[in-house]
Image: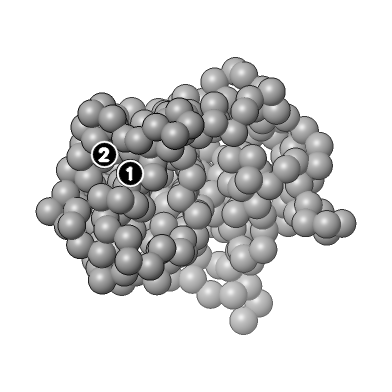
Amino acid sequence: MSIEVKNLCAAYNERVILSDVNLKIPKGRITMLIGQNGCGKSTLLKTMARILPAKKGDIFLEGKNMAGMTKKAIARRLAVLPQSPVVPEGILVKELVGYGRFPYQKPLSGLGREDHKIINWAMEKTGVYELRERKVEELSGGQRQRVWLALALAQKTGVLLLDEPTTYLDMAHQLEILELLKKLNQEEEVTIVVVIHELNHAAKFGDHIVGLKNGEVLFEGTPEDVICRENLRNLYEIDAVLVNQREKGYPICMDYSLIGR
């Protein structure tokens, strides 16, 4: 599914975070949102998911204005993984992943055969099926993150929105999560939007990059087109040394320094 944002403004109380944002998220691709802390990345993600109401503007999901959609209808089309989600105490992996089926359940009804089939599929896709009887709180950070991804997958949506899914993970587990997202994108054709801080991760795994600064879109495009010295000067106020990964074609930031230092 594609997402289109038109003239979007968002704020916390009277503090405006996003101002007149226009953006198209390409269908079936991985879009990375990058920029300095406080630039509006997470706010944009929350507003696209309608967790945070927009002050002005419209968000369209596959051409349909989300303002006219119920929360349950949105949850059947779009799944959100917030930053550092709280794990309910004592819950098993299979139970947490089962929460992803709630948008499809009728009042007072339990999980059906099809629900259990999808839950098992989601756990297998994310490599946590063998952990299904374990308590989530007992798992490592990387394992927990895969369980949360399984929950999102169990919603069976066409869009995944993820807010810093690699936060607090070591390098190996960061790569594990990003490679899993890439695999899901390719095999399931899911549209994925990720808020991320690591520039090289964004360039390596993203198909589409959006640079945000002070609540506005500074640039957007493929990693090859937008990850350049000038854009990084404007976005992060750094002087970056970039090289191109010849085999796969994405840019790599080899070194960087603050401008004027």
219, 53: nearer the viewer: 53
How crowded pointer 1 is (Cα within 10 Å; few <14, some 14-19, many 20+) is rated as many
Q: How is the image coloured?
A: one colour
Q: Residue at x 12, y 53 (%)?
A: 130
Q: Specify the quadrant of the image occupied by residue 153.
A: top left
Please tell me the numbered disc located at residue 90. Answer: none
What is the distance, in whole Å, between disc 1 and disc 2 at their CAs?
6 Å
Q: Is residue 117 visible?
A: yes
Whether residue 110 is situated above or below residue 172 in the rendered picture: above
Query: Which residue, as the protein is rendered here, is positioned at the far top?
Result: 63
Amino acid carrying label 1: it is Gly
How far across and how far down the image is residue 129, in percent? 16, 49
Q: Residue at x 46, y 39 (%)?
A: 79
| Image quadrant occupied by the C terminus | bottom right
Q: Which residue is mark 2?
A: 119
Q: Residue at x 47, y 25 (%)?
A: 1
**Total numbered badges shown on the rendered structure:** 2
Q: Are marks 1 and 2 in contact (CB under 8 Å)?
A: yes
Query: Which residue, as the protein is rendered here, is positioned at the far bottom?
Result: 261
Q: Which residue is mark 1?
A: 98
How far across and how far down the image is residue 91, in percent? 32, 60
97, 9: nearer the viewer: 97
Q: Residue at x 20, y 40 (%)?
A: 120
